[in-house]
Amino acid sequence: MEPTSKPSRLGRPLSPRLSRQAIGRTALAMLEEEGSISLPRLAERLGVRQSSFYKHVTGRQEIIELARGALVERVPAPEQRTGSLDDVIRQTFDALRSAYREVPALLPLMLAQPVSHPAALALYDRFAAAFEQAGTPAHLIIPALEALDSAAIGATLDAYTMEAAWNIGDEDQSRYPHLSAAQEAVAAKHVDRFAFLADVLSAGLRATIDDA
């Protein structure tokens, strides 16, 4: 007598194929590898039907927030120590820029919507606490975070998209003598743009906060 085969298992799989975390991580990987995101391609990468997304998210905007959360998860900010205001400003700027340069293609998408992912909100809450402990007046904490965030995003996009912000041909240098001379000077004496930006942000924010 031949042994009977075991019946196949019915019902739900032990591990669900799709989750909010999996959607966020896969969306982030897609942006990193392909430079863009589309729901059909995202569904293909996850091995599910596009309609399956709507059991977990409301639409594209929420998927972008999940990708933001995955970025925070991948590049956690260093533990911020209580220190001077200058230390807090530089630590915050460096942490933001370190995260943003991981997946620059995500930045234009994040700019179009407010931060709502719990992990990202928790990160900004830590930044706010550091500014508070450094003596920043409460009404200037949000403007300080906005200034640092905008600068980190702008610096990342500039570095990602182009080598120089001004393109002046040799035949046109006489028409723009001051800008051309400035370009020649910075080419002859290298300046770390990110360190320079950090210096400017630190000096400006510190002066504004000290005068408040």
Image: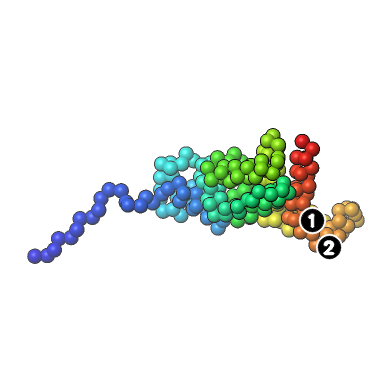
Instruction: Identify the amino acid type marked 1.
Output: Asn
Q: Is residue 90 left or right of 25 when viewed as pictured?
A: right
| Residue with the mark numbered 1 | 167
Q: Nearer the viewer, mark 1 or mark 2?
A: 2
Which is more toward the observer, 158 or 116?
A: 116
Which is more toward the observer, 107 or 148?
A: 148
Which quadrant does the N terminus fall into?
bottom left
Dot 2: element: loop
Which residue is the extreme one toward the left? Answer: 1
First-in-chain label (1 vs 2): 1
Question: Looking at the picture, how far across and down is residue 130, in whole percent?
Answer: 65, 45
Residue drawn at the location 79% of the way across and 42% of the way down: 207
Q: Is residue 112 left or right of 148 when viewed as pictured?
A: left
Residue drawn at the location 52% of the way across and 55% of the way down: 29
Instruction: Identify the amino acid type marked 2.
Output: Lys
Q: How is this picture coloured?
A: rainbow
Which quadrant does the C terminus fall into?
top right
Circles 1 and 2: CB atoms closer than 8 Å: no
- Residue 62 visible in the current orientation: yes
Question: Looking at the picture, how far across and down is residue 143, in whole percent?
Answer: 70, 39
Question: Looking at the picture, how far across and down is residue 115, in whole percent?
Answer: 58, 41
Q: Is residue 173 left or right of 106 when viewed as pictured?
A: right
Q: Is residue 201 left or right of 3 when viewed as pictured?
A: right
State how far apart marks 1 and 2 are (Cα).
19 Å
Which is more toward the observer, 32 or 102?
A: 102
Question: Looking at the picture, how far across and down is residue 194, in whole percent?
Answer: 73, 55
| Residue with the mark numbered 2 | 189
Which is more toward the observer, 25 or 49?
A: 25
Residue drawn at the location 60% of the way across and 45% of the way down: 126
Please rate how many residues cluster around mark 2, counting C-alpha atoms within 10 Å: few if below 14, some from 14 to 19, many from 20. Answer: few
The quarter of the picture where residue 211 lies is top right
